[in-house]
Amino acid sequence: MSTLDVAIDEETWAAASPDRQTEWDAAIRELTDPTTLVIRPDVRKILVGLTEQRVELDVRGEGDAALATITIPHDLLAAPIREYVDIVRQLARTDQAGGGLARIEALDMAKKVTHDRGGRAVKRACRELELDMKTARRLFTLVLSLRVDTTRLHGIHGHRRVR
């Protein structure tokens, strides 16, 4: 069982609203849950930085030793993020309009498939971290919440149980 500390770079953190900081804290807690976390055993800390072009992961080990710097270009995740947000918006509209259980279940499944696609892209970009798919999905969630203000999206959290 690995112990991992994940932090957002100070500039990004300071520029965010308290609601966004709360979202990021929740995503980080879920990502770093030691009962589900699968990551290379020598990784102890990841500092997540955000620039105009990319997400940067500064990966550290014992004694704060530098292990890797991983760059995830925004282009790599642009399509799954855009698709995911679009599906969430459709879900919200369908919920509000009483669009029917079958439509909601179909959209929720599409949301899950898109989340998986984003997770697979993160997993490939972060090969050297040796993430499993669940951990990669959680890291995608954190990156998504950094790129998009998820506090403004109704229905972004969780998936419904399909019958």
Image (tube, grey):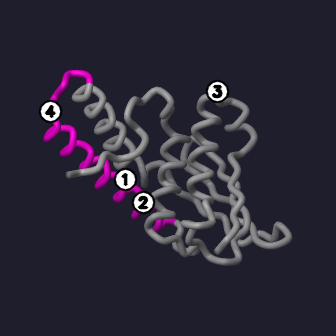
Query: In x, y percent, where is residue 11?
Result: 73, 37
Of the two numbered discs 4 and 1 in the rendering, the one whose residue sits closer to the viewer: 4
The one of 57 and 139 positioned closer to us in this rendering: 139
Residue range in magenta is 96-125
Crowding at dot 4, Cα within 10 Å, few <14 / some 14-19 / many 20+, comes out as few
Q: Is mark 1 on a helix, strand or loop?
A: helix
Question: Mark 3 near mark 1, Cβ–Cβ under 8 Å?
Answer: no
Question: Mark 2 near mark 3, Cβ–Cβ under 8 Å?
Answer: no
Crowding at dot 3, Cα within 10 Å, few <14 / some 14-19 / many 20+, comes out as few
Question: Mark 2 near mark 1, Cβ–Cβ under 8 Å?
Answer: yes
Crowding at dot 2, Cα within 10 Å, few <14 / some 14-19 / many 20+, comes out as many
| Residue 38 is inside the magenta segment | no
**What amino acid type should be assigned to the residue bearing mark 4?**
Gly
Residue in view at x 31 percent, y 43 percent: 83
Q: Residue furthest right?
A: 63
Mark 4 vs mark 1, CA separation in Å: 23 Å
Query: In x, y percent, where is residue 153?
Result: 42, 30
Label ID, residue 144: none
**What amino acid type should be assigned to the residue bearing mark 3?**
Ser
**What amino acid type should be assigned to the residue bearing mark 2?**
Gly
Label ID, residue 17: 3
Mark 2 vs mark 4, CA separation in Å: 29 Å
Sequence-first tag of 2 and 3: 3
Q: Is mark 2 on a helix, strand or loop?
A: helix
**Quadrant of the image occupied by residue 50:** top right
Q: Mark 4 points at which residue?
A: 100
Query: In x, y percent, where is residue 9?
Result: 71, 45
**What amino acid type should be assigned to the residue bearing mark 1?**
His
Q: Residue furthest top?
A: 97
